[in-house]
Image (cartoon, rainbow, N blue to C red):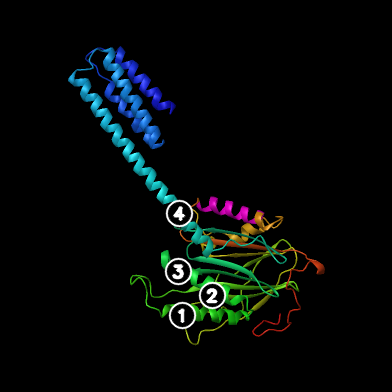
Amino acid sequence: MAIPVALIVAITVADVLSPENVHLGPLLVVAPALTASFGSSRLTALVGALAVTALVAISVVRNSVLTLNHETQIAALLIVSAFTVLFCRLRERHLAELAQVRSVAEAAQRVLLRPLPERIGDVRIASAYRAATDQARIGGDLYAALRTGHGTRLLIGDVRGKGLPAIEEAALVLGAFRSAAHREPSLPELRTELEETVCWNLLQPPADSTAADESFITAVLVDIPDDGSGIEVLNCGHPAPLLVHAGQVTALAPRQYATPIGMCLPQAPNGDVDAFPFAPGDTLVLYTDGVSEARDHTGHFYPLADRLAAWTDTESPEELLTHVRGDLNGFCKGTFDDDAAIVVLRREAVSGDERPPGHTARQQTRSGVSPG
């Protein structure tokens, strides 16, 4: 407000002090035009009225109110100010509509990709998501975690594709996981249910004929039992999780990868469920290739495992995630060519009387589980 008013005063004084053949009054149109760039329509109208008043004052001082020159200047200033206020009002209406659409979109995205709780059972969790598409909260990457009667199950995945089809595929997999995981099938059985759901969806008539006909999802399924100090992992063609234990970072590579979900191959290998240690104090980092394949200006990939080794003394998953996010943004200068998701888990020691509700003795042998 101060700058437009100062301009009006300066132009008015300059015009009054100028020779009679010099007319600076038309420059007053700058004040409402400038106000419209940052102010509301009401403020713009107020500044426009002040500019018109100043031009009338100039005419009075110069004794030329009724001359054609000043009458034309005043009429032109009124018209330009009115149009400026009108366009400012239209902009406000469009911004309000955009804000409402964004609010609805963000609510829908939060329902689809629910924020992970800070703690499930004896596991603390921190997560972050960066969509490659501007103004989007989610894309083709996905993650979910839920409690079962015996522990915690997690899913992290990456839909091969972009745009709305990838989001639809991610929504389908998340819904299938939440529907099936709580019934506690084995990890291969859970993967089979996800596979059948995606393949069934591929048989349905597409709503958009331009959408890609082929897609698949790389994923990691993790089972964290309440009793014991290990985890079970089924890797469906996804980047291997990283385990931070005693200051060392280890990639939990599977003995055999399962086929990515949605390939719909009759004889596709179901993969092996691998057992890994996950003791109190250990940290597990799950991520998508948008993290590990982020590039710097020289084209080098982000060395996630090497960077994690420098932060093994962090006290919480939130601190470790903060380190990774800041370092990753600096590495690629905030430019991401793909969606990037990362989930950090740390197991904490829990005494017997602090076990979460629903804790019961877990079976020692499960179908498809690696013996060691």
Residue matched to label 4: 102
Residue toward you, 77 or 139: 77
Secondary structure under tag 1 reads helix
Query: Where the N terminus falls, by quadrant?
Result: top left
Label 1 to label 4: alpha-carbon separation: 32 Å
Q: Secondary structure at mark 3?
A: helix
Disc number lying in front (1 or 4)? 4
The answer to whether residue 101 is above or below residue 88 is below
Residue at numbered disc 1: 199
Please state which of residues 153 and 97 is positioned toward the viewer in this rendering. 97
Mark 1 neighbour density, 10 Å: few (under 14) some (14–19) many (20 or more) = some
- Structural crowding at the residue carrying mark 2, measured as other residues with C-alpha within 10 Å and reported as few (<14), some (14–19) or many (≥20): some
Quadrant of the drawing holding the C terminus = bottom right
Question: Hey, what amino acid is under mark 4?
Answer: Arg
Can the viewer see residue 294 in this picture?
Answer: no
Q: CA distance from mark 3 to mark 4?
A: 18 Å
